[in-house]
Image: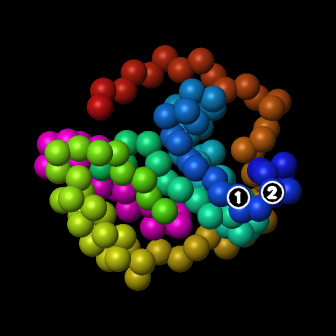
Amino acid sequence: MMAALRHHPVGIMVARGDLAIEVGFERLAEVQEEILWLSEAAHIPVIWATQVLETLAKTGIPSRAEVTDAAMGVRAECVMLNKGEHIIEAVHFLDHLLHSMQADQLKKRSMLRRLAVADVSQPAPESTTHFVG
Protein backbone atom coordinates (compact mmCIF):
# COMPACT_ATOMS: atom_id res chain seq x y z
CA MET A 1 0.00 0.00 0.00
CA MET A 2 2.85 2.36 0.83
CA ALA A 3 4.48 1.76 -2.56
CA ALA A 4 1.16 2.27 -4.34
CA LEU A 5 0.70 5.68 -2.70
CA ARG A 6 3.65 6.95 -4.76
CA HIS A 7 1.48 6.66 -7.88
CA HIS A 8 -1.77 8.48 -8.53
CA PRO A 9 -4.49 7.55 -8.94
CA VAL A 10 -4.46 4.48 -6.73
CA GLY A 11 -7.12 2.18 -5.35
CA ILE A 12 -7.37 -1.10 -3.45
CA MET A 13 -9.39 -4.11 -4.57
CA VAL A 14 -10.27 -6.46 -1.74
CA ALA A 15 -10.35 -9.73 -3.69
CA ARG A 16 -11.25 -12.06 -0.87
CA GLY A 17 -10.60 -15.28 -2.79
CA ASP A 18 -6.97 -14.33 -3.38
CA LEU A 19 -6.71 -12.87 0.10
CA ALA A 20 -7.89 -16.13 1.70
CA ILE A 21 -5.15 -18.00 -0.15
CA GLU A 22 -2.54 -15.58 1.16
CA VAL A 23 -3.63 -15.30 4.81
CA GLY A 24 -5.82 -18.38 5.36
CA PHE A 25 -9.56 -18.56 6.00
CA GLU A 26 -9.03 -18.07 9.72
CA ARG A 27 -7.61 -14.56 9.24
CA LEU A 28 -9.69 -13.50 6.24
CA ALA A 29 -12.28 -11.39 8.11
CA GLU A 30 -9.63 -9.77 10.31
CA VAL A 31 -7.33 -8.85 7.44
CA GLN A 32 -10.07 -7.52 5.16
CA GLU A 33 -11.28 -5.35 8.05
CA GLU A 34 -7.75 -4.02 8.57
CA ILE A 35 -7.40 -3.31 4.84
CA LEU A 36 -10.59 -1.24 5.04
CA TRP A 37 -9.20 0.67 8.05
CA LEU A 38 -5.82 1.30 6.45
CA SER A 39 -7.36 2.35 3.14
CA GLU A 40 -9.69 4.78 4.86
CA ALA A 41 -6.81 6.28 6.85
CA ALA A 42 -4.76 6.69 3.65
CA HIS A 43 -7.76 8.07 1.69
CA ILE A 44 -7.49 5.23 -0.82
CA PRO A 45 -10.73 4.13 -2.48
CA VAL A 46 -11.68 0.46 -2.05
CA ILE A 47 -13.38 -1.94 -4.44
CA TRP A 48 -15.26 -4.74 -2.60
CA ALA A 49 -14.94 -7.75 -4.89
CA THR A 50 -15.06 -11.53 -5.30
CA GLN A 51 -18.39 -13.30 -5.62
CA VAL A 52 -20.53 -10.48 -4.21
CA LEU A 53 -24.17 -11.59 -4.68
CA GLU A 54 -22.98 -14.25 -7.14
CA THR A 55 -25.83 -16.67 -6.40
CA LEU A 56 -28.36 -13.89 -6.85
CA ALA A 57 -26.82 -12.86 -10.18
CA LYS A 58 -26.81 -16.46 -11.42
CA THR A 59 -30.03 -17.92 -9.94
CA GLY A 60 -32.14 -14.93 -8.91
CA ILE A 61 -32.06 -15.83 -5.19
CA PRO A 62 -29.27 -14.68 -2.83
CA SER A 63 -27.92 -16.74 0.03
CA ARG A 64 -28.09 -15.31 3.56
CA ALA A 65 -24.31 -15.14 3.69
CA GLU A 66 -24.22 -13.18 0.43
CA VAL A 67 -26.63 -10.58 1.76
CA THR A 68 -24.54 -9.86 4.86
CA ASP A 69 -21.35 -9.95 2.80
CA ALA A 70 -22.79 -7.48 0.28
CA ALA A 71 -23.92 -5.20 3.12
CA MET A 72 -20.26 -4.81 4.13
CA GLY A 73 -19.72 -3.22 0.73
CA VAL A 74 -21.21 -0.03 2.17
CA ARG A 75 -17.76 0.65 3.64
CA ALA A 76 -16.14 0.53 0.19
CA GLU A 77 -16.35 3.11 -2.55
CA CYS A 78 -17.27 0.50 -5.15
CA VAL A 79 -18.76 -3.00 -5.18
CA MET A 80 -17.98 -5.33 -8.06
CA LEU A 81 -20.59 -7.82 -9.25
CA ASN A 82 -19.94 -10.70 -11.63
CA LYS A 83 -22.19 -11.20 -14.62
CA GLY A 84 -25.11 -13.57 -14.57
CA GLU A 85 -28.58 -14.14 -15.96
CA HIS A 86 -30.11 -12.07 -13.13
CA ILE A 87 -27.50 -9.29 -13.00
CA ILE A 88 -30.10 -6.50 -13.31
CA GLU A 89 -31.93 -7.84 -10.26
CA ALA A 90 -28.60 -8.13 -8.44
CA VAL A 91 -27.73 -4.49 -9.20
CA HIS A 92 -31.14 -3.29 -7.96
CA PHE A 93 -30.91 -5.48 -4.85
CA LEU A 94 -27.40 -4.20 -4.08
CA ASP A 95 -28.47 -0.59 -4.62
CA HIS A 96 -31.39 -0.98 -2.20
CA LEU A 97 -29.25 -2.84 0.34
CA LEU A 98 -26.44 -0.29 0.33
CA HIS A 99 -28.82 2.65 0.57
CA SER A 100 -30.58 1.08 3.56
CA MET A 101 -27.21 0.32 5.22
CA GLN A 102 -25.82 3.85 4.82
CA ALA A 103 -27.95 5.17 7.66
CA ASP A 104 -26.56 2.49 10.01
CA GLN A 105 -22.93 2.37 8.94
CA LEU A 106 -20.29 4.82 10.04
CA LYS A 107 -16.75 4.70 8.83
CA LYS A 108 -14.44 3.10 11.35
CA ARG A 109 -12.55 5.36 13.68
CA SER A 110 -9.09 4.47 14.86
CA MET A 111 -9.15 2.47 18.06
CA LEU A 112 -5.37 2.85 18.34
CA ARG A 113 -4.93 -0.88 18.61
CA ARG A 114 -2.12 -2.78 16.98
CA LEU A 115 -3.01 -3.97 13.48
CA ALA A 116 -1.77 -7.41 12.51
CA VAL A 117 -2.27 -7.20 8.74
CA ALA A 118 1.48 -7.26 8.10
CA ASP A 119 2.46 -9.49 11.01
CA VAL A 120 4.93 -11.96 9.55
CA SER A 121 5.92 -13.43 12.89
CA GLN A 122 2.90 -15.75 12.73
CA PRO A 123 2.52 -17.32 9.29
CA ALA A 124 -0.98 -18.15 8.13
CA PRO A 125 -1.97 -21.59 9.42
CA GLU A 126 -2.58 -24.37 6.96
CA SER A 127 -6.31 -24.29 6.35
CA THR A 128 -8.03 -27.60 6.90
CA THR A 129 -11.48 -26.05 6.81
CA HIS A 130 -13.54 -26.86 3.74
CA PHE A 131 -16.31 -24.48 2.78
CA VAL A 132 -19.27 -25.43 0.65
CA GLY A 133 -20.66 -22.51 -1.34
In the drawing, does residue 16 fall left or right of residue 88?
A: right
Q: Marks 1 and 2: CB-CB under 8 Å?
A: yes
How many other residues sit within 10 Å of disc 2, few (<14), some (14-19) or many (≥20)? Answer: few
In the drawing, does residue 127 fall left or right of residue 73?
A: right
Residue 22 figure quarter:
top right
The residue under the point 81% across, 57% down is 7
Tell me which secondary structure the magenta stretch mostly adopts: helix
Which numbered marker is on residue 7? 2
Where is residue 6? Give x, y as percent: 85, 56
How many other residues sit within 10 Å of disc 1, few (<14), some (14-19) or many (≥20)? Answer: few
In the drawing, does residue 48 fall left or right of residue 8?
A: left
The residue under the point 18% across, 59% down is 89
Q: Magenta stretch: residue 20 in it? A: no
The residue under the point 63% across, 53% down is 12
Where is residue 1? Give x, y as percent: 77, 50
Where is residue 110? Give x, y as percent: 72, 69
Q: Amino acid at mark 1?
A: Val
| Quarter that holds the C terminus | top left
Q: Magenta stretch: residue 61 in it? A: yes
Instruction: Examine the rendered structure and indicate whether residue 124 appears above or below residue 19.
Output: above
Instruction: Examine the rendered structure and indicate whether residue 119 appears above or below residue 100.
Output: above
Residue range in magenta is 54-77
Q: Which residue is mark 1?
A: 10
Distance CA(mark 1)–CA(mark 2): 6 Å
Residue 92 figure quarter:
bottom left
Residue 97 figure quarter:
bottom left
Q: Amino acid at mark 2?
A: His
Total labels: the figure holds 2
Q: Taking the image as drawn, is residue 1 in sight?
A: yes
